[in-house]
Amino acid sequence: MNDTLKNVGLFALVGLLILWTGFSQSWNSALLILNMGLISAIMALGVNLQWGYAGLFNVGIMGFVALGGLATVIVSMPPVNDAWAAGGLRVMLGLVLGAATIVAAILAYQKVPAGRARTLAMLVILVGGFFLYRTVFDGGVMAVEAVNPAGTGYLGGLGLPILLAWPIGAVLAAGAAWIIGKTALGLRSDYLAIATLGIAEIIIAVMKNEDWLARGVKNVVGLPRPVPYEIDLQQDPAFIARAEGLGMDPVTASTLYVKFGYAVLFLIVLLILLWMAQRALHSPWGRMMRAIRDNEVAAEAMGKDVTARHLQIFILGSAICGMAGAMMTTLDGQLTPSSYQPLRFTFLIWVMVIVGGSGNNMGAVLGGFLIWFLWVQVEPIGAWLMQVITSGMSDGYWLKTHLMESAAHMRLLTMGLILLLVLRFSPRGLIPEK
């Protein structure tokens, strides 16, 4: 079997699994798996850029995905005028003072000669700037969060179309990646992993605790949509007529129509990013990145700026993850900072890349679809399997009770088992890098 036929067969298998979900369970479930599979494939594509192209071990994916979700609130939610009037300008001024303090400290460190004068200047700038920043910023935050805390309690956003939040999410993630990369990319790979994980946790902690920014753990609900609302479709006579002509209930038809609309948008983004990633992979730049990955010393001896190239691809991969995070929050219709967990938004994405085939863009996309399907379906399949196994046991028997309760843990067990099997029998993934 040649490689092309094998790859087509693997993608066809995933497609058949999604179709099986539609026929055996519901088409709502199938479309939801498809949509999250598309988003997961985009995340895996971003991680594959970093690891598969350059060998960068980033375990802070969760933080970049969360920044993309934050972008949807900042861009699309309407501004809360009362909050801005109460303390919005003080909050902005406080942030400017904080940034100015950091810039002044950097300039002082660079311009003042080493010695007591530099130490004294740094202390004065940092301590004085910190207290000035907190005095202005804290007062503004308290005023903003006091404005209808049950319903708003934050500044809101710009009230722009939510589709603009997708590239803005990429920009936010890229900015964070630049800051992280300037400080951490000179570290060894294991230290880079620790640094990225720690910074991702800091991003999540800020989102959870700074209510003025995105309501913290109170969540932001009711995000605008790029597709129609179901209730609007159900009240449209033309849509009702089309649904009835297809023999469908208008309520079910409206739900499927909305999910299919999301799928089309996500597929367009995935195809564009995949095309760009493939062009980059086969370009001189892509060959240079793989040369750096395989032997940094030799690449540096040939005059390549390894650190600059690492920073470049770290920013690109993080930007793709940020865009995927904005797309996922758009699909959910709400921002829930407490839902960002390393297991879901870091470990699972890495499993997708490893199982699909690191260094191969098509493999990353395949891994995104396949692993997400298994992540969703393993638990109900596990419960059915336990019912079959224990069908001959009496109710209340300790072994039957134990096995039925264990079905909830089948998801984690299966992910670990799949990862072990792939690493043992196909260590380069289902679609290996050529």
Image (spheres, rainbow, N blue to C red):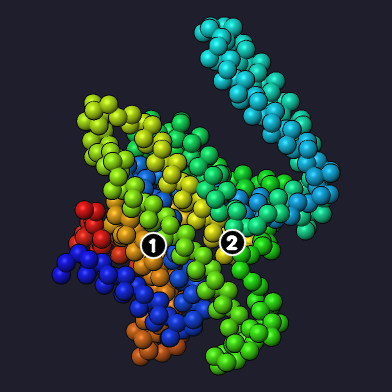
Q: To which residue does mark 2 refer?
A: 330
State left or right for residue 396 relative to residue 427. Answer: right
Q: Residue furthest left?
A: 1
Type of the residue with mark 2 = Thr
At x 40%, y 44%, the residue is 58
State left or right for residue 394 relative to residue 151. Answer: left
Compared to residue 188, the image places residue 387 above or below, namely below
Q: Position of residue 285 (x, y in %)?
A: 31, 40
Counting residues from the start of the chain, the first of labels 2 and 1 encountered is 2
Q: Position of residue 225 (x, y in %)?
A: 63, 65
Indicate the quadrant where residue 292 lies: top left
| Circle number at residue 368 | 1
State left or right for residue 371 relative to residue 128. Answer: left
Type of the residue with mark 1 = Gly
Q: Between marks 2 and 1, how big is the CA–CA gap?
A: 19 Å
Residue placed most toward the observer, 288 or 306 = 288
Please indicate, yes or no, whether residue 410 appears anywhere in the rendered image.
Answer: no
Indicate the quadrant where residue 249 lies: bottom right
Residue placed most toward the observer, 100 or 197 = 100
Indicate the quadrant where residue 150 lies: bottom right
| Circle number at residue 32 | none
